[in-house]
Image (cartoon, rainbow, N blue to C red):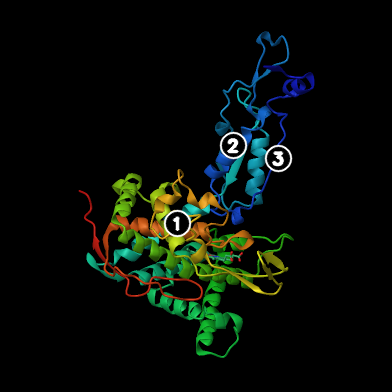
Amino acid sequence: MQRLRGADARFLYNEMPTQPMHTIKVLVLDPSTSRHGYTFERLRDYLVERVARVEPLRRRLVPVPLSLFHPLWANDGFVNPRRQIQCLQAAGPGGLRELCEIVSRVASRPLDRTRPLWEILALTDRSLLSAYAGFMEEEVKTYLQVWPKEGVVELMQLLSELTVFIPSRCLIGLEFRRHLSPDFARIIYRDLAGSLNPLAILLPGLPLPSLRRRDRARREVAAFIAQIVTDRRRRGAVDKDFLHILMTARYADGTSLSDEHITNNLIALIFSGLHTTAAQGAWTGVELLRHPAYLRRVLREQDEILGNGRAITLEAVDAMVVLERAVREAERLHPVPVLLRKVLRDFQYRDYTVPAGWLAIASPGASHLLPELFTDPHRYDPDRFAPERAEQRRARFSIISFGGGKHVCTGMTFAYLEIKVIWSVLLREFELRLLDARVRPSQSSFWIAPRSPCRVAFRRRKRAG
Ligand code: HEM
């Protein structure tokens, strides 16, 4: 026990219900370069470990009977730092205004004197992701509704179509999605994405038929988005999608985004993630169907979390850890082929000097199979990511299919959510069997997808009752 100094005790005596004496600090964190994205649980675990090393943060206040003297500080092991670190949800759209409202609410509430006199509140806006989880489930269910009781599907085609519909709904919105018939989606997908090759990237203005088709498709999509933006502005509509975020976003100088910037951002965002998500989603399925023992565990988990036909929520998706490990193992075994960086300054690697101006290429396919990082690296073993093994923590950037550093994939959280929702719905609604046991990878410069034939036989599950 330690007695509070008079100067410190004065803050307690001066405190009124309407005039708290604590101070408050606000920290805005950018989680975009965090390798596995942000989760409150990870942040709390990290903070708890740090707090344990700072003795004053483990003290609590003990009043002296009849207030005969200043209160005492006790460090008697009764403090549980986890209780001091809480998560708050911000209201949408999660901008500066919502942050200020929460900060002023917290600042005007005195601290609870029966606990340590500090607290950390992590503020997250997951309202958009929550909405996305619902939209995603709806899209997959609508897509599957027209499937017969049983049949055969080409897996990559299934994933390619779903990964056009889902981001169109979540990012551009319902108006765009309603106009996106399967045929229109196929044409857009083929024409816009068909030009994703090294030649088109190095010489985007070449007069090739594929690039003319790309430009026409882009013009069509841009005109459609511009029409939606105009219509929403006229109606003053507030929608839960990324288009709304862009329409209400401001640059640092307070100006809003032009319609052209909004369209460019949306097209870039959608097409950055189409093939990669389809490929990783398809590999997740191929590997699961090849490994029935692990698949059974995934099904059991689905049953535990969403038994009795409960609707998917973001919290339910978060809880699907067995499925998540399967997605991650697919990411490890079937990553994007290359990551590119332009070398800005000469640097030394062992006996080599890499000069500025060169292109540096990293190969996730090679680094994901390093035996010093991953035990028995060629084996399908999603449990390597379970907390007790956590092989991905053996080195920074051990898994780099989403890139790393400043330019790490912006859509990683979205892609994981999307793939988990797709497989959650598929596995619960259908019994699936992989017909082509020897699925080979297709080789492309930017992604590696399962090559056709990669057929899956499906049969609708009988509903209980
Ligand atoms: C499994 C799915 C995906 C994979 C494997 C993937 C992979 C990648 C990779 C390797 C990069 C380059 C990172 C680097 O150079 O360090 C990247 C960048 C990017 N990705 Fe993804 N991605 C996926 C899904 C998505 C989705 C769904 C979106 C959008 C909703 C998206 C949006 C972006 C954007 C905007 C960038 C550029 C980031 C920057 O340069 O700052 N990605 N992605």
Q: Residue 49 shows which numbered tag?
A: 2
Q: Is residue 425 left or right of residue 356?
A: left
Estimate the x, y position of residue 53 in percent, counting from the top left.
Answer: 64, 33
At label 3, the amino acid type is: Lys
Estimate the x, y position of residue 227 in percent, counting from the top left.
Answer: 55, 73
Q: Which residue occupies 55% across, 32% down?
A: 83
At label 1, the amino acid type is: Arg
Q: Residue 375 shows which numbered tag?
A: none
Q: Which residue occupies 37% across, 72% down?
A: 440
At label 2, the amino acid type is: Glu
Q: CA gap, disc 2 to disc 3?
A: 20 Å
Viewer-nearest residue: 61 or 323: 323
- One can see residue 313 in this view: no
Estimate the x, y position of residue 451 in percent, counting from the top left.
Answer: 37, 74
**Badge 2: residue crowd in 10 Å (few <14, some 14–19, many ≥20):** few
Residue extending farthest to the front is 351
Estimate the x, y position of residue 25 in percent, counting from the top left.
Answer: 70, 40
Element type at marker 2? helix
**Badge 3: residue crowd in 10 Å (few <14, some 14–19, many ≥20):** few
Name the residue that disc number 3 marks.
Answer: 25
Q: In the rendered structure, are the residues bearing label 1 and label 3 in contact, judged by CB atoms less than 8 Å apart?
A: no
